[in-house]
Image: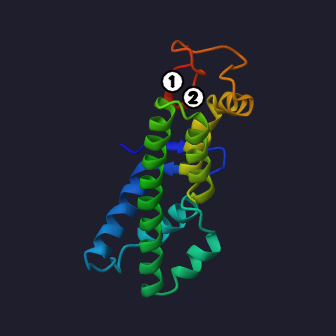
Amino acid sequence: MAVRHVWAWGGAVTSDDWRKAIDLGLALANCAELPQDDPELPALLRRVAPQMGMSHADADAALASAPATAALVSEIHRRMREGSFRLGRAFGASDSLKENGDRAGALKVLEDAMAAEVVPLYRAQLQAYLDNGCSMVREVCRAGCGVVHGGLGRSGEAPGILGESLV
């Protein structure tokens, strides 16, 4: 069963589409060729390309030839892979910094990842992470005194920061 999410940026993310794009990228990386007789391939790439931060025009242009289509699939796969790794590294590093008391560093790691990210879904995930309490982290960092305005979480730290529950 495909999971479908519609995000504020207007894109619809379907897990089956992403899985197919990943499989195509892996096949190309292993020296396979794209299926030439698959009528679904152009539609799939037209759906997935905007989800990777590419324009519809660029996707359409890439579908004009087999080498350009292969390059499009490779770029889609690269953006998925690198964005996923970037997200994991950012969340892990920010959590580690937070645990060590470096809230400013934790926030900076997330902001740096956001600045580098082009995939709308990954940007939305980073933004959600930042929105869930990071405004309080900014106040703590600016004040430099450890006082959080708006209440404390169970541990005495800013609620909702980098994975802590708001209750």
Other residues around mark 2 within 10 Å, as few (<14) / some (14–19) / many (≥20): many
Q: Indicate the position of residue 73 as horizontal and vertical percent values.
A: 43, 72
Q: Quadrant of the N terminus?
A: top left
Residue at image position (40%, 45%) is 2
Residue at image position (62%, 38%) is 104
Which residue position holds label 2? 161
Along the line of sight, which residue is nearer the eye, 139 or 40?
A: 139
One can see residue 128 in this view: no
Q: How is the image coloured?
A: rainbow
Callout 2 amino acid: Ile
Q: Residue 66: which quarter of the image?
A: bottom left
Residue 152: numbered disc = none
In the rendered picture of this protein, how many numbered marks are placed on residues?
2
Q: Indicate the position of residue 51 as horizontal and vertical percent values.
A: 55, 58
Q: Helix, strand, or loop for circle 2?
A: helix
Residues marked 2 and 1 touching at CB (< 8 Å): yes
Callout 1 amino acid: Glu
Residue 164: numbered disc = 1
Is 124 situated above or below 156?
Answer: below
Residue at image position (57%, 45%) is 110
Q: Residue 36: which quarter of the image?
A: bottom left
Is 133 situated above or below 11?
Answer: above
